[in-house]
Each structure stands twice: as structure tokens, then as C-alpha cells.
Amino acid sequence: MSEKVVLLNSVGKDDRGYYIIHSPSRWSQGVRDLSSWFAYYPWELAYSSSLLKKYTDYKVKLLDPCLNRWDKHQTLQAVLEEEPHWLVIESSTRTINENLWVAKQVKKEINTRLIFVGQHPSVYPEKMLAQGIDYVLYGEYEYTLLELLLRRSPENVPGVYPNPPRPLLDFSQLPWPEDEDIPRIRYGMPGEPSSEYLEIQAYASRGCMGDCKFCVCRNIYYRKKSWRPRDVNDVVEEIKYLKHKYPEMEGIFFDEEAHNTSKDFITQLSRKIIKAGFNNLKYEAMCDIRFLDEQILQAMRTAGYYKIRFGIETADPKCGEKIGKKIDIPRTIRLLRFSKKIGLKTYATFMFGLPGADFNIERKNINLMEFLIKEGLLDNVQISIVTPLPGTPFYYW
Ligand code: SF4
């Protein structure tokens, strides 16, 4: 009889009653008020699920306590009902205590073997092992998990702590992410604070060419600059599959790190979307403004993109330098004006409390935001109070 593997996203409600918005390769946060809550599709776990289902005989089940807003007791109950031989949990620092509690209870009750992955375990593997976790897979973990569960001796599997790191995977070779255990459409939650339409979260590339000191995926998951696109034909095939399976789907949110890193890629993808007749859908994408120009923006708009998201973070170039982000405000304003001219909505992120930011610099940030909003150049503004996450250079600053 084949063994069972449960892939578990973080608990969805912490011990203090906060609902968790979990995006472990970026950041995780808790909100008290459900009107501020939404759910990220747990994409690395979902890719792992697809790989295990495709290449192994394990019975595999993806569970998402965040989507279901389960606290640790409800999460434990759901896992125990599955009676897994293996439990894989992706955790960030935000909910590591609750996730460890669940894992230890499961081990105590049914002697399940425990694998921890994600930001916090990658940074503190010894602490995890000392707590009774059997394996810690650090960094980008999908193929590490596959190889480990294919029963290669752990000491021979790169990426299993304390072995050497695994080379970054070829993103174009991954199967599409899991869509059986949890329908991907369930993560479409139109309206603030999520997307405007009933959109499915999808990924046309992985990684980015940025160097932000606060960034978890850049510094912990991928450990270097790297941008890895998929074949644009395969991306369009995935859109076709999703639209066929979920006719109610209104669009796609390309929620990778930097959708537009290659001009050639984004131009080709836009053309393929139009050719396949899917430019009647609504697309939004996480972008890197350094690689946007008027031509790309126009191509995206023609293909049905309605919104671009990108980080400005600070109005002060010196602050930008300190966090590894090159800031060019005049160019940003020019591109925002063009975006608005062609009917593309804009969503920008800002950070308060950056290294070196004093009252005057924060005032400058507010002035810039006020200006952009008054000029009608930004539709959404996301403001974060900086939270250094363990494992990023920013944490040790
Ligand atoms: S642009 Fe910066 S924050 Fe965004 S994914 Fe790249 S390194 Fe991370």
C-alpha cells in the first residue's frame, strides 16, 4: 500500500486570533478583521503536489488552513483525519510556533515523519531539527522534496539540510500547479484587498533580477538574481485549461516576482494571448518597473492586462540604495502617465521605516504618494511598515 503525504500550508489563524495571509517566500501577516483578509495560492506546495502526483506512487493531499481560516486545533484535526505517513509544512517566522505545535502533535499521535520547508526552517534548520522535525529542506524545495520522497538517501539529496544547496530548478519543466485537492478558483476573491475580478493566481516565470535586501525569495529561496520564464505557449495552454475548467473565471493574476523581466518574453506572451483569443480576459501582474517601457505597456494593454503592480518603496534614492533598489522617480512618473493614458491601472508599494529613513525622508515619501494620487497616476497604494525577516540581509542590518 502506498504511503500518504500531506502538504500543509501554515495554520490560518494564530494563537492571538489573527487571520493569516501567508506568502512564505515573500512575507506573511495577520489581520484581525476579515474584511482585510484574502488568501494567496500556496504555489510552491502546489507545484510540489503536482510533482509528487506525477512522478511517485504516494497518495498526496494538499491542505490549506489559511484558505479555510483554521486555527491550530482545526488544522491538527484535518491532518489527523488524513493519517499521513509524511507531513510537509511550509512555514514563515510569523506562524512557526503554531506550525511546530501541529507538527509535534501529529508526530506524537500517529508517528508521522515531519518535513519543514520555507523561510523560517531554511534560516534556522538546526532549531527545527532540535524540535523533532525529521528533515529540513532549505531554499527552493520542490525537487528536493521529490528526490527525498523517492527514497534517495537523504545525505545524497542536495537541499536537504545540512547537504550542499540544490541548483535552481528549470521553471519551464515544472508541471502546472495542483488543481485537484483545492480548486484554484477558490483563491479568486474579487474586491479589496485582493484583485478586482474573479482571477486565478498563475505564474509565468520565477525569480527576478532585483537585489532587494529585504526580499525573502531573492535571499532565501533563490539565493541569487535569477529570472526563469516558462514557454509562452505553455502559459497560454494553462490559461485555456483554467478558462475551460472554470468558465466563471474573469482573469489571471500573474503573481510571480517579476512578470516582465524580459521584453521579448512579455511581447511574445502578449501576442500569444491575443492569437489564442484570450485578450478578452483581465490580467494583472507583479512587475519590475525597471524593465517596463512604453512599448511593453502598450503590448500588455492590448493583450488584456488591466493592472500592473510594482514596487516604488521610497522616494529617496539613497534609501533605495541601502535596500538594493534603484529608484528613478522621474522615469516612474513618465511610465505611470503613459499607463494611465492607455487605460492601464497601477498599484504601487511603499515602505516606511527603511534603513536611514528619517522624518524628512518619510515626509518626502508621503509627498510623492500625495502627488501620484492627486495626479490620478496610482489606483492602489500599498504601504508597509518594514519588518526585517530572518535570513534577509535587512534582518542583520
Ligand atoms: S524586485 Fe526586489 S522585492 Fe521584488 S522579487 Fe525582486 S528582489 Fe524581491
Image (cartoon, rainbow, N blue to C red):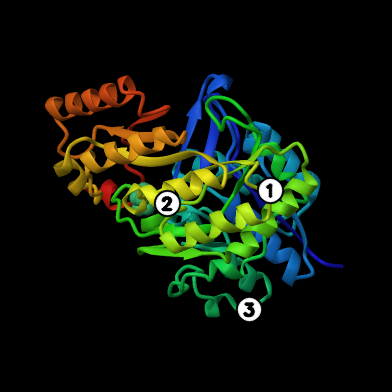
Q: Does 43 sit left or right of 207 as displayed?
A: right
As rendered, which of 218 and 278 lies closer to the eye?
278
Q: Residue at x 77, y 65 (%)?
A: 58
Sequence-earlier tag: 1 or 3: 1
Name the amino acid type tagged 1.
Val
Q: Which residue is mark 2?
A: 296
393 left or right of 357 in image = right
The answer to which of 323 and 248 lies nearer the viewer is 248
- Mark 2 vs mark 3: give the one in front: 2
Mark 1 → mark 3, Cα distance in angstroms: 24 Å
Task: Give the spatial CA distance, label 2 vs label 3.
Answer: 45 Å
- In the image, 2 versus 127, the foreground residue is 2
Task: Report the mark closest to the observer, 2 or 1.
Answer: 2
Q: Residue at x 65, y 45 (%)?
A: 105
In this rendering, the count of numbered labels is 3
Q: Position of residue 212 (x, y in %)?
A: 30, 51
- Cβ atoms under marks 1 and 3 closer than 8 Å: no
Q: Is residue 313 above or below residue 145?
A: above
The residue that disc 1 covers is 106
Residue 52 image-quadrant placement = bottom right
Q: Earlier in the sequence, mark 2 or mark 3?
A: 3
Secondary structure type for disc 1: helix
Residue 288 appears anywhere in the view: no
Q: Position of residue 166 (x, y in %)?
A: 47, 73
Secondary structure at numbered mark 2: helix
Q: Quadrant of the N terminus?
A: bottom right
Q: Horizontal and vertical percent for residue 216?
A: 39, 51
* Residue 152's disc number: 3
